[in-house]
Image (cartoon, rainbow, N blue to C red):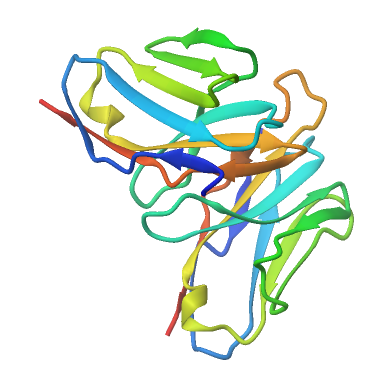
């Protein structure tokens, strides 16, 4: 069990550019979550998937954000036309719905985005 | 009103003492409750979860849940300098997890 893996770990981009983050969940986990966290705040929910189906997307999420999980394994989060306010740590988490430990989520190490 | 409320701290605790962290929530339909620890610049790591009213102990940590009063707490016994971190309270409601802003704990030698 290698844990949740995120790539890249750090990204610096110019305002207006597009960025994409990748997440590989724990192998047997069927649920995958994306969160965003800024300094002094808790993780903010963005979206989550069960297998390949996107079950919910935050109403606060701009249309510039899109996420996919095409084969129910890895997921990508794309941010188009980045703005300085997008600077944050983007966290991916996964869980096994119906597992013995209940729906407990485990986080990856996060992807830091800085928009300059 | 935020769905999950925590005192931001910092909570200063002498080494060896008990740290007590509290969390209140607004959604009575919440089913599961979690405590995560987050070191500066790192991602959250799970400490423990609790589903039923009462206490649950895991090593130096004890989680307490009172659904009627809508609060969950975490006790850290024999606090160590390595416990200095931000502690996040989270709840699950129909598959979605909501987090509080966290309480910063500083354990002083």
Image position of B68 with respect to A20: above or below? above
| In this rendering, position of residue B79 left or right of residue B68 | left
Could you tell me if residue B20 is visible in this image?
Answer: yes
The part of the image, by quadrant, that contains residue B3 is top right
Q: Residue at x 58, y 37 (%)?
A: B26
Q: Measuring from the top left, give residue A22's x and y in whole percent.
A: 67, 62
Residue A62, given in percent of the width and then of the height, sits at 67, 75
The quarter of the picture where the C terminus of chain A appears is bottom left
Q: Is residue A2 visible?
A: no
Viewer-proximal residue, A76 or A102?
A: A102
Left or right: A91 in relation to B78? right
Task: Classify B22 as above or below B5.
Answer: above
Q: In the picture provided, is B20 more to the left or to the right than A82?
A: left
Image height of A15 relative to A89, above or below: below
Q: Nearest the camera: A80 or A60? A: A60
Q: Position of residue B53 (x, y in %)?
A: 59, 12
Q: Is residue A85 above or below residue B75?
A: below
Query: In this view, which residue lies farthest toward the left?
Result: B109
At 37% from the left edge and 52% from the top edge, which residue is drawn?
A: B41
Residue shown at the point (44%, 22%) measured from the top left: B73
Residue B44: percent from left, percent from top: 48, 41
Which image quadrant: the N terminus of chain A?
top right
């Amino acid at each position: 069990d290698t844990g949740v893996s995120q790539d890249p770990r750090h990204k610096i981009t110019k305002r207006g550019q597009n960025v994409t983050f990748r997440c590989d969940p724990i192998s047997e986990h069927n649920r995958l979550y994306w969160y965003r966290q800024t300094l002094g705040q808790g993780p903010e929910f963005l979206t989550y998937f069960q297998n390949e189906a996107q079950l919910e997307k935050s109403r606060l999420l701009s249309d510039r954000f899109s996420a996919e999980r095409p084969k129910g394994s890895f997921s990508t989060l794309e941010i188009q036309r980045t703005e300085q306010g997008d600077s944050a740590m983007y966290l991916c988490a996964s869980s096994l719905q119906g597992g013995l430990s209940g729906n407990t989520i485990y986080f990856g190490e996060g992807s830091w985005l800085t928009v300059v | 009103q935020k769905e999950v409320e925590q005192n931001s701290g910092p909570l200063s605790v002498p080494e060896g003492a008990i740290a007590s962290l509290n969390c209140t929530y607004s959604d009575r339909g919440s089913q599961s409750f979690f405590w995560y620890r987050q070191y500066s610049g790192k991602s959250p790591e799970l400490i423990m979860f609790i589903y039923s009213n009462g206490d649950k102990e895991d090593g130096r940590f004890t989680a307490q849940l009172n659904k009627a009063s809508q609060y969950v707490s975490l006790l850290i016994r024999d606090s160590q300098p390595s416990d200095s971190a931000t502690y996040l309270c989270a709840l699950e409601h129909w598959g979605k997890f909501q987090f509080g802003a966290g309480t910063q704990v500083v354990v002083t030698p």
